[in-house]
Image: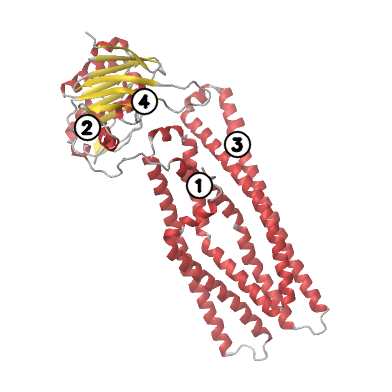
Amino acid sequence: MTDPKRGAFKGLLALLRPFRTIVTVSVALGMVGGLAITLLLATINNALHSAAGMTQGVVLTFAALCVVALLSSIISDIGTNYVGQRIIAALRKDLGEKVLSAPIGQIERYRSHRLIPVLTHDVDTISDFSFAFTPLAIAATVTLGCLGYLAYLSVPMFLMMVVAIIIGSAVQFIAGGKGIQGFDLARSHEDELQRYYNAIASGAKELRMHRPRRFRMNTHRIQETADRISDIQVRSVNIYILAKTFGSMLFFVVIGLALAMQAYNPNPDPTVITGFVLVLLYMKGPLEHLLGYLPVVGKAKIAFGRISELSERFSSPEPHLLMDDSEAPKPVVNSLELRDVSYSPPAVEGSEPFHLGPINLSIQQGDIVFIVGENGSGKTTLIKLLLGLYPPQAGEIRLNGEAVTDPERDDYRQLFTTVFSDYYLFDDLVQGSATQSLDSATKYLERLEIAHKVSVKDGVFSTTDLSTGQRKRLALVNAWLEERPVLVFDEWAADQDPAFRRIFYTELLPDLKRLGKTIIVISHDDRYFDIADQLVRLRAGQVVHEMEPA
């Protein structure tokens, strides 16, 4: 596997490839504008020392060069703005699609505190770099044009300037290496800071209840990490500032040497020395502009390294995962079966490897199946295998007696409605739900005793800002409205009060069964195990007991 940072700059250029025509035109116009500015300097210098003064030809030339410089700059900047915005959109769409199509196991292992900064901070950093291309082209052209004019005026003074640029470039190269190291370290600490932000948002209640932990989170984690990032950034940017200041000093040293050379020249030419000083003073701005963008380039290389790492991690999309909204006809689910299914998730550092299986399980249409067992016994892993979220490493999943193949797995998943223990509640109803009448949605909301807080309008819940238990009830409404043949509930009743827990087990599940639904429930509520048609008990990844309650 290649180091993402090694090809970062090539990757940055690759982002511009789809827009190469616009980029080429923008850069070319930027260079034309830079050349026009250089010619303006030469025109001004010649006019100052010309015996004829400001002739009509000089005025027309001056005006024409001003118009060329202005129009070139405007058109070039418009093109750069367009390309920059399209690059941002392309990056966001590409990364979003990669995450959406990645195997679920990869997403679960990639922490959100690392993912979010890439999708936000790093993409914005790349956009800053993309906007800099045309200004850099203009600055580079002006600098090269000025150097060409200096060579025309005086070869010795031109060579002296070249030596100064070589020395300044060497200093900038050394400074750039040190600066990029600092930017990379600061970016790593950004991930840490994002993790702490997630902690104070998700653990707000716990932090209110524990003053020492709250103090430690604020003082030793957030503040120290923020200060560390600030200190590293300050040191890194200061390195560039020192190098830039050294370069500015070289300019004035060269000007001083040029004046000294003219002082000792027996036949000094005022046009040469005036033009040399004028061009040098003007060239200082574009050259410093070039050097000023070095931190932007350095940060962009770091950002692209992070984006490349994310893209490489998610570079193998799940095969046969459809990204359109097509709906395949849903077959009647007469039976679901796991036959000799085994699965071992990637080992987590510092913990014992876990293995599930081999599992043999048969579920008939209309069954209520309870999957029970201690925490860590493999219940959720078993459910993810049954849902087709994890591909079996051995054995097969069978639907109506036929093995579910890889090309069929995405269609197979569409047979299920799920409410996971760590579910995410979307506020919009899924495709198909919009065709349900408002009366049906209202009926479900009323039955779950949340109609006074939530309504459905234009296929969207009016709010999802509810208590944990009420949010799970809203997720159940969504499950009802989807009208899929198999419903899976991962400890749905855990956040419900005793009265509603009883309603879930003794009323809602039997009602769903009467509608012909197949229901799979992960549960610890042993007082309701008699509701199940089949009880599957797991221990350490093995089915140790399977029965049909009397």
Can residue 420 be seen here?
A: yes
Q: Is residue 422 left or right of residue 35?
A: left
The percent coordinates of residue 325 (x first, y second) are 26, 43
Badge 4 element: helix
State how far apart marks 2 and 4 are (Cα).
20 Å
Instruction: Choose the circle earlier in sequence order: 3 or 1.
Output: 1
State how far apart marks 3 and 1 are (Cα).
19 Å
Foreground of the two, 529 or 337: 337
The type of residue carrying mark 1 is Asp
Q: Dot 4: few (<14), some (14–19), or many (≥20) neighbours within 10 Å?
A: few
Can residue 461 be seen here?
A: no
Q: Dot 3: few (<14), some (14–19), or many (≥20) neighbours within 10 Å?
A: some
Instruction: Choose the circle earlier in sequence order: 3 or 4.
Output: 3
State how far apart marks 2 and 3 are (Cα).
46 Å
Dot 1 corresponds to which residue? 122
Write the residue at 38% across / 18% down.
541
Q: Describe the colour scheme in one phrase.
A: secondary structure
Dot 2 corresponds to which residue? 481
Dot 3 corresponds to which residue? 225
Write the residue at 53% across / 23% down.
350
Task: Please identify, in this view, whether the residue under mark 4 or under mark 1 is nearer the observer.
Answer: 1
The type of residue carrying mark 2 is Leu
Quarter of the picture holding the C terminus? top left
Dot 4 corresponds to which residue? 468
Task: Please identify, in this view, whether the residue under mark 1 or under mark 2 is nearer the observer.
Answer: 1
Instruction: Choose the circle earlier in sequence order: 4 or 1.
Output: 1
The type of residue carrying mark 4 is Thr
